[in-house]
Image: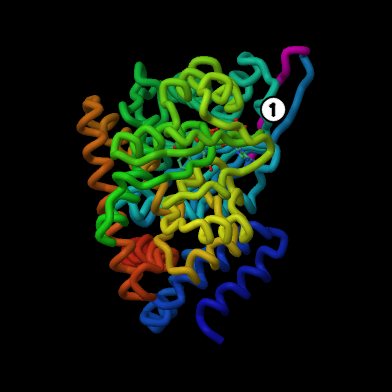
Amino acid sequence: MSYVNEVYEMLQKKHPYEAEFLEAAKRILDSLTPIVDANEDLYRRNALLERFVEPERIVSFRVPWTDDQGKNHVNLGYRVQFNSAIGPYKGGLRFHPTVNQSILKFLGMEQILKNSLTGLPIGGGKGGADFDPHGRSDAEVMRFCQSFMTELYKYIGKDVDVPAGDIGVGGREVAYLYGQYKRITNLYEGVLTGKGLSFGGSLARPEATGYGLIYITEEMLRAAGEELKGKSVVVSGSGNVAQYAIQKAQERGALVLSCSDSDGFIYDPDGIKLDLLFEIKQKRRGRIREYAEKAPRSEYHAGEKPWSVKCDIALPCATQNEINGEDAKKLLKNGCTVVAEGANMPSDEEAIDAYLAAKILYMPAKAANAGGVAVSALEMSQNSERLSWSFEEVDSRLKDIMVNIYRNVSAASEKYAHKGNFVIGANVAGFEKVAAAMLAQGLV
Ligand code: NDP
């Protein structure tokens, strides 16, 4: 049996109840087969894969808190410290009722490879709690964050583990968590990223994921002898990633035809009007259907996704599994030749198979949306030197990072699969550096 399959079978026996983690581990291990086969003796001797698939440490703890009515609750909190071979653990905290150890292990394993791809010294981790912030008052969210940090602070630190936000953990939560960490430890250090600008946050962090997505898309097009200018682009979502992807794509001369939310999508043949989008989403936290009321030639399609709109480029920036096999077929039939993922896991397996079979340019999320965590790592650097860089400096470093990610992913695809298979390219390019560091550091 191949080494990859042996390790996967071992995982199945050890963690039979962790369905999400097993699925992710299988996908990643399968895509690593070419590099594992090429180094099998070395990797086996060093139990490299057995170590790669097990977190270095998992902390789980109860989080007791009291709601505004005086009722007591107990949630479960976690931090999965997956891999610190190339830097301190780094990855978001998710507050959502579906959070469990299996999901956090799956997200943590992905994070190891994404963080490695940035070329910056950050290891992989993920954490969170099965707490639902929806409908909770600020005071309740603050008490929950304070209770969560009262346990978590023991295991994190600027050189140990630097969490950030994720679903359900935005600027408000990061700020409450940071306040409690500082209060308990008496340390003013960059222990969290995604902080407010007044207490150590980085300029260009809100823009980073969307801008980074466009920078890597441009690089992918350039390598194929094309450019973004003049291309038609379909974007899904209208949140943080979508807004800044639309802004940068328009700056580069593309025509962005759509945006969406979970209720439906907007089609604007003249191009999405950014001022209007910002006014609805950033000023009023409104719904995307309001756009059509103010932009006369635009159309609102309730309950639909934008994948039937004819375009050259699709940028899914909303949520997981938003493009299924049928959607992918529609995109391809209408002439779409580029898909780059701003959201995490927006394409399901059938959709990915369809892109690969059609040999279009497909950049998976791990590489395409790494700009967010890259600028988080730049926030860590600024905190360490107690300086704040200008917007231009952060943005220019982000651009260099995305161009490098493209080059490394492309080179790895050529070496281990065929040029253009960026799924294998991204996993292998991320893994190579982690594997080299793990081998050099011995059996730890
Ligand atoms: P936001 O919450 O700001 O925006 C999410 C957008 O997606 C909203 O427009 C939301 O609409 C829409 N959406 C959510 N669920 C659905 C659904 N089921 N169908 C259609 N649309 C939906 O999140 P972000 O922009 O920050 O994140 C978007 C994606 O990018 C996520 O997958 C996230 O994990 C990923 N990501 C984000 C990074 C970042 O730096 N922000 C970094 C790397 C990845 P509605 O308002 O109706 O919910």
Q: Relative to 407, does residue 34 appear above or below in the rendering?
A: below
Q: Residue at x 53, y 56 (%)?
A: 331
Q: How far from the left and from the top, in percent, is residue 131?
A: 67, 32
User: Which residue lies under the disc numbered 1?
Assistant: 64
Q: How far from the left and from the top, in percent, is residue 65?
A: 69, 23
Q: Which one is in front, 255 or 18? A: 255
Q: How far from the left and from the top, in percent, is residue 403?
A: 26, 51
Residue 295 visible from this viewpoint: yes
The mark total stands at 1
Q: Which one is in front, 76 or 258? A: 258
Q: Is mark 1 within 8 Å of ligand 1?
A: no
Q: Is 221 placed left or right of 232 in the picture?
A: left
Q: Relative to 406, does residue 398 appear above or below in the rendering?
A: above
Quadrant of the drawing holding the N terminus = bottom right
Q: Is 68 placed left or right of 180 in the picture?
A: right
- Magenta: main secondary structure equals strand
Q: Relative to 53, does residue 327 appear above or below in the rendering?
A: above
Residue span colored magenta: 61-69
